[in-house]
Amino acid sequence: MKKLLKADLHKTKAYLDNHCRQLERARFKYFYANGEKEKVLEELKVYQNSDGGFGNGIEPDFWTPVSSPMATWAAGQILFEIDADKNEPMVQQMIDYLIEHYNRETGKWLSVIPEINDAPHAPWWHWEEGAEENWSFNPSIELAAFLIHWSEPESIAATIGWDSIKQAVSYLMEQKEMDKHEINNFQAFVTIIESHQSLLETETGHSYQIILNKVEELAFHCINKDTSSWDSGYVPLPLDFIDSPDNPLCERLGNLLEKNLDFYIEKMSEEGVWNISWEWGMFPEAFEKASIYWQGILAVERYKKLEAFGRLEFK
């Protein structure tokens, strides 16, 4: 079985320290070098604006300083990752922002905003009339789950959260296929909402298990199972949908999961990081920086998954 060694860890940490953002350095140290949660919060705060939302390029593929729901989603994922308390001021300010920018008619938050066009960005983030139709409940379903997780029952935030969830689940149950990123949003939603199963069924008319099964089925069909094409570009791999051996998809995918773990280890560079599989085709200088920022993000994400499956020799 292929595993990462202590020497790999040292190389990764050195690369992050020398090239990547302070945020990813703090996250990596939090998980693998006895780092402190407070340091992650400190670095995350850099990306929060006075309106409570996040911007300032926290998502490296769009650099607008203006707050957006999508950038706020990226921050929310990190807050959830480190188990931030609901009374943390940064969390409460984020909740206020989400309350302010919710669209009750659609049950969503905007996925792309016009201000994205004013700063370097990848083409898929470019705003134009009608662009919102391409995003559906990415990231709204996950933002709604954040509201439930970090707010009091029957609060305005929780009411908005459940309103969005009802519309999102209704949409989910009608889908026969779905984009990888939106599936990931629904996967995060079912993880966050697990402790609210009874209320979930009351609000949506569907049991937690039925919703979980639906998301699992969409994920299974989305996964690229042709291992010969995994290195061909931006394709959905098994580990894009699986965080731990407890995931029911593990049994269904069989040895494909082990092959994906081996693939990750084989594709680690001599510097201890992973290169991204996409390009912008525009803003070349900004993209060069963004690709390095992504190396830090991928390092945190992939180390966590390799650890979950026992692929770190030093853990």
Image (cartoon, rainbow, N blue to C red):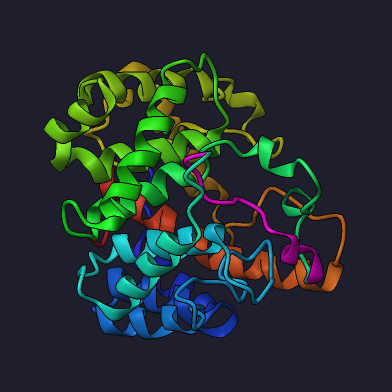
Q: Is residue 37 visible?
A: yes
- The residue at the point 71 percent across, 35 percent down is 232
In the figure, is residue 203 to the left or right of 275? left
Q: Is residue 108 left or right of residue 200?
A: right
Quadrant including the N terminus: top left
- Pinpoint residue 242: horizontal percent, then vertical percent: 37, 36
- Magenta-tinted stretch: 106-118
- Prevailing secondary structure class for the magenta stretch in the rendered image: loop
Q: Quadrant of residue 189?
A: top left
Residue 250 vs residue 40, the one in the foreground = 40
Residue 207, horizontal then vertical, whole percent: 21, 21
- In terms of depth relative to the viewer, which is nearer, 186 or 152? 152
Query: Which residue is drawn at the image coordinates 63% and 74% (left, top)?
Result: 66
| In-image side of 46 versus 131 (left or right) | left
State the residue in front, 232 or 80.
Answer: 80
If the image is split into quadrants, where does the C terminus sit? bottom left
Q: Nearer the viewer, residue 98 or 137?
A: 98
The location of residue 251, given as percent across then percent down, is 28, 20
> What is the total number of numbered labels drawn onto the structure image?
0
Q: Residue at x 33, y 84 (%)?
A: 39
Q: Position of residue 311 (x, y in %)?
A: 32, 48
- Residue 299: in sight, yes or no? no
Residue 109 belongs to magenta span: yes
- Look at the image and say whether residue 271 sits in the magenta stretch: no
